[in-house]
Amino acid sequence: MRKSFSDVFRHPITHAPLGLEVGESTGDEVITGVLRSSEDEFPIVNSIARFVPAANYAESFGRQWLEYSTTQLDSRANWNESRRRLFEGTQWPEDLHGQRVLEAGAGMGRFTEVLAQTGASICSFDLSRSIEAGYENNQRFSNVLFAQADILNPPFELASFDKVLCIGVLQHCPSPRNAFLSLCRFVKPGGEIFIDIYRLNWRSFLMGKYYLRPLTRRLPLPLLRTLVRYHVGWVYPTTGVLHKVLGRPGRVASTVLSVADYRGVFDLEDSKLKELALLDTFDALSPAYDRPATVGMVRRWFESAGFEDVQLSCAGSWVKAKGRRPRS
């Protein structure tokens, strides 16, 4: 955490300013220290301000993104998928100099990297320890502030961000609606929020993960990791044959058997596609929560928040939406 960014943080409940007490530092970088209010204090550990306990419902994502810390990173993965997904979804300009962006559920920082290159001031947080991977991947950018924090209580000033981004997160919250409404509080008048969430429709009943998850989400994560490797190990080559013979139905078989399969989706070498299969299969089976939403549900969330210019679209298994907070 940079000393020059310390005044950005607020108490996550009262939103009062926090004072900085530096422990170990190198130049402007605070490696250890404390952010303190009159009643509470929050540690800075390994250059990241921590506003939540280390153990929480997002533990699986901490393990996942620390292991696959660069798999989806544009600069390391030999693809442009994160940039494409962000700008096609949000329709935001690629030059955001002078704006403040809040990134909720940043994970290992695949979208943080893209946002940082827009020139905006980025506040990036995640509930899990995956924020450590996000920090390692993006600490080279001087315009990014990192925190380990709860989406229901982000440690920032209310109504202070031009843009709020939340990609691939809401479905993994105990209440996606409450998480969304929490983020809306941080959008300034005239500012925008963009979200996506797993889509709930008839195809959801074909997804094998929803039949396995009652068991897999309760397993110890090291055991689940081993089982996922075994499961992908036999399903992946089997459905690969179906891909070659049947085409698209082969991908349907992968979905039914609960294995992520991007053959024919991304133009990547086989080893990279297999790595993505392992990553996203674990991602599907391990989270404590997986709560998709219908288009109508998402529309009602924006209505509850009082946002205008709401745009909704569906892309595959996703609902994407953005809206603007009224200026008055």
Image: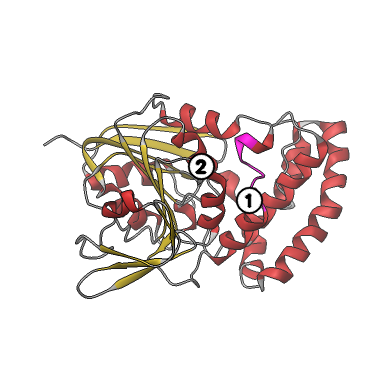
What segment carries the magenta color? 68-75
Q: Is residue 303 above or below residue 219?
A: above
Q: Residues within 10 Å of mark 2 (few under 14, many from 20)?
A: few
Res. 208 visible in picture: no
Q: Residues within 10 Å of mark 1 (few under 14, many from 20)?
A: many
Q: Is residue 321 above or below residue 285?
A: above
Dot label at residue 140 = 2
In primary-sequence order, the first of circles 1 and 2 is: 1
Q: Amino acid at mark 1?
A: Ser
Quadrant occupied by the C terminus: top left
Q: Position of residue 139 (x, y in %)?
A: 50, 46
Q: Amino acid at mark 2?
A: Arg
Q: Position of residue 9 (x, y in %)?
A: 29, 56
By secondary structure, the bulk of the magenta-drawn segment is best described as loop
Asked if residue 315 lies left or right of residue 14, the reply is: right
Asked if residue 323 lies left or right of residue 274, the reply is: left
Residue found at the far left of this picture: 328
Q: Which residue is mark 1?
A: 69
- Residue under the image location 29 percent in, 52 percent down: 181
Colour mode?
Answer: secondary structure
Q: Position of residue 66 (x, y in %)?
A: 62, 57
The quarter of the displayed image where residue 311 is located: top left
Relative depth, front residue between 152 and 31? 31
- Residue under the image location 66 percent in, 31 percent down: 79
